[in-house]
Every structure is written in structure tokens, then in C-alpha cells.
């Protein structure tokens, strides 16, 4: 029961699973678009879900891509979902250790996020994997923690997860042969299933109680529980558990000396298992039938089913080897993907380092240019502007360098990061203003001295030119005076000549 129930519960409880999923082709078309954001992460883990039932290795590969991208862009929800889908794929592949590791990674994320529902789900899934690994003590540890968490949370979380946790606790105690505790938890799971109107969990609880009571030797009550389980499990989706129920009937009928009924239910289990490809259930039924016919002295039939059992064992071994090969191949794919991701991150880190180096070179050069411009004839406002920009670049570069360190020290707590940045700003802002005042005063002072020197030089040149022009003016004045006197003399002589002529005319 535990393997089928574990598979179904991992699929149902994995927060990456959805009832209605997008088609594989449409998801692939959406993934063609170049993007590296949370939407791509969602598309990757949804596509991974579509492959988990027939290509678990592809599921693992896609889920790992989603996980690595989530980690790079710091998308915590996507990383948690990706770990869950990857763990489901590894469980289906039979790699329980890797599945456990991924659920542990998911648990670490959920502990930091303080999500009660996801935290309890991760604890429950870890308990399930430990059941499959036959480490029942650790399974109980995690299942108890999950149960106490959902009881404390109550509400929708309790309604969703309590049934599964109680069933897993019952299964664990059944494996430990602790009959009383197993009956207690299966009975509690049945009550919760009835309360929540869950047909599946009612069927699981009845089956668990039937197995426990049959192990206890209470065949009549066990038979009643098996009969109660059949209507809930006979819906075409729980055939693996239906095979287990049929084998339970067969064992009880054999102990109660009802060979015909035992044979009928054993063959029913064998046929269902063969039809649906449940090799382990088919092997259990074949072993039962071989032993049954041997007791009935029907050696031919016993030999036939013994041959079937041997073939099924070989098939299971071959299947196990195939899974081991797939696990090795998948592990290598994961390793190669991690190497490629590491190379990409190293390339991005080198690019960031080159950018920081370029900034470190640019800021001093820009400041040197500012000082140089302050020593040549250029507008004073330009010098002031370049000085302010230089200081802004310097202080913002300091914040850029300090921010990753602050994030690490504050453990990515945004409130603490904000407080730390405020404290740093409270110290840097006054320092910035003071340095700005000093630097601009120094730059503009030199600029003002140069301007004053140039103005003084211009004044001196003007005075010299005026002095040089004064003698020329005096010469021009004397020349004009002489010319005027000459003209007056000429006029007076012409007047005298005219008077003499007139007197001569009179005498005549």
C-alpha cells in the first residue's frame, strides 16, 4: 500500500502539481521566447510535471533548470516548487536518496519563508521517503512534526494535510508491527476522511485497518474493513491498492479454509496487476498462487505460476538495473547542468568585475579632467557641474560596493538593510556636502584667480594703449591749429588785395 499511496500523495501534495496543466506543446512554444524571469521558471516546472509519469528523467532535467534559474534571480517560490517537482521525478525513478535530499532543500527554504502549509507538506513528504527507505524512526520524527504543525495551524491547512499525515503514521507503525498505534492512527484517518468527505482517504484508512487487523489475527473484522475499502478504491484510478485489497481477501480466505474464494481473489489481483503493469503486485500474486496450488497438490499449475514468478523477478531486476542506469545518467546530466550554470555565473561575475574596474578607472580620470578644466578658460558653471558629478559618482560607487555586503550581513532582511543604508546615508550625506563645498571652492577659487589676472592684464593693456594715443592726439591738434592760422592769413591777404584793387579803381 505504501508505494502506491506515496506516489499518489507525492503527486497531490507537491505544490508544483496542478489539476489542469497547460499542454506540452504550448509550454514549449512559450519557452522559446528569450526571458530569464519568474514566468520562465513557472513554465519550466509546469512542463516538468507533464513528463513525470512517462519520462521522469526529463522531469528532473527541466525542474533543475527551473531551480537554477530561480536561485539566480532569487525567486524563492519558484525554487521551492522546483525542488518539489525534482524530488517527485527522482522518487518515480527510484532514486529515493536524491528525492530525500531535494525535499530537505525545500524544507530549508520553507523554514525561512515561514509558510505553514508548505512547511508541513515538506515534513510529510520527507517522512514518506524515510518509510520507503525503511528508516521508520526518522519517518516518525518528521511525521510527528508535520502533524503538530497542521494541528496548530488548523483551518484549510489541517483539512488538506491531516488525512495524509495520519495515514502515513499508521503505515509507519504497521511496518514497525506496533498494532495498537497503527490502529489508532488509521482509525483517526478514517474519521478525518469521513469528516472531510474524502473517498480516497476513507478507502486508504479501511485498507490500512484491514491489514493491521489481519496481522493481529482478527480475520472477521479485517474482512469487513477490506469490503468497506473496495467501493472507495474501485474507481479505475487506484488499481494498485485494489490489488493489495484482493490479496488481503485471498490470504484471509486461505486461513479460513475457503480455497475457492482465495483462488478467485488471488487471480483477480494477478489479472489487475498484469493488465496495469504492476510488476511487484503481479509477483506477489504469482507467489501466492504457486504456493496455493502446491498445497492443493496441483503441481502443474504451481509450476506455471512459479515460472511466472521467476520471470517477474528477472523483469524486476532488469527494471531495477534500467533504473540504476537512468539514475546514473540523470545524475550526470545534473552534474553537467551544474557545471554549465557555474560557468555562466563565473562569466557574469567576470563581467561585473570588469564593469567595477572600468568605474574605478573612470571616476579618477573624470576628476582629473575636472581639475584640468578648472585651469583653462571655460565657464565657471561647467567646472562646478563637473565637480558635483565627480563627487556623486564617487559616493554612489561606495554604496554600490557596500550593498552586497549589507545584504549578506543582514541575511537579506529588507527592514534591516533599509536601516543600515539609512545609517550609512546619515554619515555620507554630510560628508558629501562638506567635500562638495571644499572641492568646488578650491576649483572655483583657482578659476576666479585666473579670471582676475586676465582682467587685470586687459586693464593694463587698455591703459597703455590710451597713453600711446595721447601724443598722436596732441600732434593732430597742433597741426589743425597751424592749418587754421594759415587759412586765416590767406583770407586776410586776399582781403587786403581786394581793398587795394578797389582803391585803385576809385583813383582811376
Image (spheres, grey):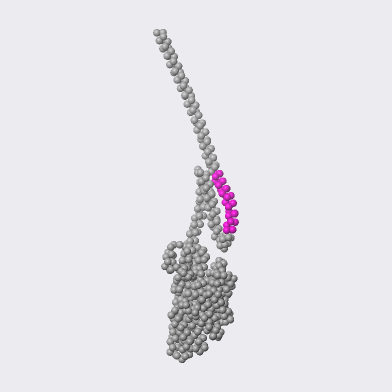
Residue 359 on image: x %, y %: 50, 55
Most frequent secondary structure within the magenta stretch: helix
Give the total of numbered labels.
Answer: 0
Relative depth, front residue between 455 and 307: 307
Picture layout, residue 59 above or below residue 492: below
In the rendered view of the protein, which quadrant contains the C terminus? top left
Tell me if residue 220 is in the magenta stretch: no
Q: Which residue lies at the image location 46% right of the left edge and 19% below the top edge?
A: 488
Give the camera-side residue of 210 and 148. 210
**Vertical order, 11 against 491 (above or below):** below
At x 57%, y 57%, the residue is 421
Q: Quadrant of residue 104?
A: bottom right
Q: Quadrant of residue 298?
A: bottom left
Image position, residue 36 (x, y; %): 47, 62
The relative height of residue 383 versus residue 459 in the rendered view (above or below) is: below
Task: Residue 138: give x, y in percent of width and height.
Answer: 56, 76
Residue shown at the point (56%, 61%) measured from the top left: 414
Point out the stretch of residues depicted in magenta. Answer: 418-446
Amino acid at each position: 500500500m505504501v508505494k502506491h499511496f506515496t506516489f499518489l500523495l507525492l503527486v497531490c501534495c507537491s505544490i508544483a502539481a496542478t489539476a489542469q496543466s497547460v499542454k506540452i506543446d504550448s509550454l514549449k512554444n512559450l519557452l522559446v521566447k528569450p526571458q530569464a524571469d519568474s514566468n520562465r521558471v513557472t513554465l519550466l516546472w509546469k512542463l516538468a510535471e507533464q513528463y513525470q509519469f512517462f519520462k521522469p528523467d526529463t522531469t528532473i532535467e527541466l525542474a533543475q533548470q527551473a531551480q537554477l534559474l530561480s536561485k539566480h534571480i532569487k525567486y524563492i517560490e519558484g525554487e521551492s516548487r522546483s525542488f518539489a517537482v525534482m524530488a517527485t521525478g527522482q522518487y518515480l525513478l527510484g532514486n529515493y536518496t536524491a528525492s530525500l535530499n531535494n525535499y530537505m532543500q525545500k524544507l530549508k527554504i520553507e523554514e525561512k519563508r515561514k509558510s505553514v502549509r508548505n512547511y508541513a507538506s515538506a515534513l510529510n513528504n520527507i517522512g514518506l521517503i524515510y518509510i520507503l527507505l525503511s528508516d521508520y524512526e526518522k519517518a516518525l520524527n518528521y511525521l510527528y512534526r508535520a502533524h503538530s504543525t497542521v494541528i496548530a495551524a488548523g483551518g484549510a491547512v489541517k483539512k488538506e494535510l491531516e488525512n495524509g499525515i495520519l495515514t502515513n503514521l499508521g503505515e509507519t507503525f504497521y511496518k514497525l508491527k506496533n498494532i495498537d498505534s497503527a490502529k489508532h492512527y488509521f482509525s483517526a484517518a478514517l474519521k478525518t476522511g469521513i469528516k472531510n468527505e474524502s473517498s480516497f482517504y476513507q478507502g486508504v484508512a479501511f485498507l490500512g485497518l484491514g491489514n493491521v487487523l489481519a496481522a493481529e489475527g482478527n480475520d472477521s473484522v479485517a474482512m469487513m474493513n477490506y469490503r468497506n475499502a473496495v467501493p472507495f478504491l474501485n474507481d479505475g484510478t487506484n488499481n494498485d491498492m485494489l490489488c493489495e485489497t484482493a490479496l488481503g481477501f485471498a490470504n484471509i480466505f486461505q486461513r479460513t479454509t475457503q480455497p475457492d474464494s482465495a483462488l478467485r481473489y488471488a487471480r483477480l489481483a494477478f489479472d489487475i496487476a498484469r493488465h496495469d503493469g504492476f510488476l511487484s503486485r503481479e509477483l506477489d500474486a504469482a507467489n501466492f498462487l504457486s504456493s496455493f496450488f502446491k498445497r492443493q497438490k496441483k503441481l502443474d499449475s504451481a509450476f506455471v505460476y512459479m515460472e511466472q514468478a521467476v520471470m517477474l523477478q528477472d523483469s524486476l531486476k532488469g527494471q531495477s538495473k534500467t533504473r540504476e542506469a537512468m539514475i546514473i545518467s540523470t545524475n550526470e546530466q545534473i552534474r553537467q547542468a551544474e557545471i554549465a550554470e557555474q560557468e555562466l555565473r563565473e562569466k557574469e561575475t567576470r563581467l561585473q568585475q570588469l564593469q567595477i574596474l572600468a568605474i574605478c578607472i573612470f571616476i579618477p580620470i573624470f576628476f582629473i579632467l575636472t581639475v584640468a578644466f578648472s585651469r583653462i578658460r571655460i565657464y565657471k558653471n561647467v567646472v562646478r557641474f563637473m565637480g558635483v558629478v565627480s563627487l556623486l559618482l564617487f559616493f554612489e560607487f561606495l554604496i554600490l560596493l557596500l550593498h552586497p555586503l549589507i545584504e549578506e550581513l543582514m541575511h537579506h532582511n529588507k527592514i534591516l538593510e533599509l536601516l543600515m543604508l539609512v545609517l550609512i546615508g546619515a554619515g555620507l550625506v554630510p560628508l558629501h556636502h562638506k567635500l562638495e563645498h571644499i572641492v568646488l571652492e578650491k576649483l572655483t577659487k583657482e578659476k576666479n584667480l585666473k579670471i582676475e589676472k586676465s582682467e587685470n592684464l586687459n586693464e593694463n593693456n587698455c591703459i597703455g594703449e590710451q597713453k600711446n594715443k595721447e601724443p598722436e592726439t596732441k600732434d593732430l591738434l597742433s597741426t589743425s591749429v597751424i592749418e587754421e592760422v594759415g587759412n586765416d592769413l590767406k583770407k586776410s591777404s586776399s582781403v587786403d588785395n581786394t581793398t587795394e584793387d578797389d582803391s585803385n579803381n576809385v583813383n582811376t
